[in-house]
Image (cartoon, rainbow, N blue to C red):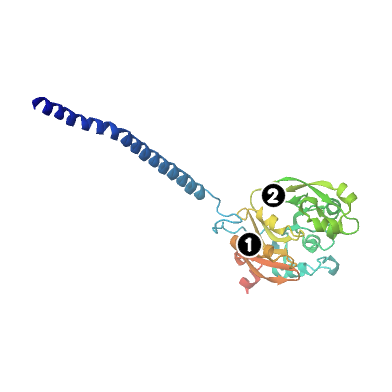
Amino acid sequence: MTRTSTKASKTQGARPARNCATLLPAILLTTMLVVQLRSANFTRSIITTKAAASSISTPLWSSGGMSAKPPPLKTQATPCQRTIAPELYKSQSQEDTILLKWLKGLCNGTYIEMGGLDGVRWSNSHVFNKALDWKGVHVEADPRNYKNLVKNRPNEIANVHAGVCLEDRDLHWVHVPHDAAVCGFLEFAAEDFKKKHWRPFMIKRAKVVKCRRFENILHEVVGDSFHFDFFSLDIEGAELLALQSLNFNEYQFGVILVEADGANGRKDQAIKTILHRAGYTFIGTINRSNWFVNDNFDLIYDDVIYDDKKEG
């Protein structure tokens, strides 16, 4: 009996050891899972923190970003009284006449014109340059138009031979003799457009033209910050690209007019959204263009346009 009891007691005493041996791997596995879970949570927290920090360092404004805006820049224009000869008006649909109503009695102002062809035909800035001593930046992609632009408008801030893209790169410009309206970049043209308007020899003769981010062009010609009194944008459907590649914190405008022929309603709406976020109010569609005015127009031009009202 004693031996049996002793054996039994030894057997019973051995069970906890075997149970511990069985439980130990499970405990270790559980511990490893907890550590891995905590590590994963920690990694996610780092990623979240970095994302938050990245969002804080985002510029105050971008084409799809926040609505905070810098203070308005003042115009460089000065008051003047000039008689303007009728033959100096060159706009296709009286855009220059409308601009003069907004910017009445100002000399030495500044502008950007994209799509001003040779600087004379259908140019919205011609009358300002020739009659009121304004200067500006012309951006023209067509090699032949650019060659004539340099001759016709030599006293400008800059005449730039380039297209506009989201990234700087080389593109190929297809020239169509006697029909400037259907010239364009090979890379941007739809297949049905190519078949309808371009012959194989035209495509073969396409010339390489630099395509640039718009803000990169402006950095080179006017520096990091500048106010233009108006911005005329008419580049055959690429208007949205131009605005998407522009930093509105650095470059500001009194009035903006953008071609809107009704062919692409989604593009027109996207442009309205971008300009609204940048601080420009849409005032209407007039003569094939959508018109926008800086929300701070009165503040920008208070010293030059409204002086007579103050004195009165």
| Residue 85, horizontal then vertical, whole percent | 84, 68
| Residue 130, horizontal then vertical, whole percent | 81, 61
In the picture, measured across the screen, residue 95 lies left or right of residue 17, that is right
Determine whether 88 is above or below 66 in the image: below
- Whether residue 205 is visible to the viewer of this picture, yes or no, is no
Q: Mark 2 points at which residue?
A: 213
| Residue 128, horizontal then vertical, whole percent | 77, 62
Label 2 near label 1: C-beta < 8 Å?
no
**Chain-order first, disc 1 or disc 2:** 2
Q: What element carries label 1?
A: helix
In the picture, measured across the screen, residue 264 lies left or right of residue 37, that is right
**Quarter of image, res 279:** bottom right
Q: Name the residue under label 1.
A: 275
Determine whether 168 is above or below 303 in the image: above
Instruction: Tell me if mark 2 has few (under 14), some (14-19) or many (20+) residues whose alpha carbon lies within 10 angstroms of its own.
Output: many
Q: Is mark 2 on a helix, strand or loop?
A: loop
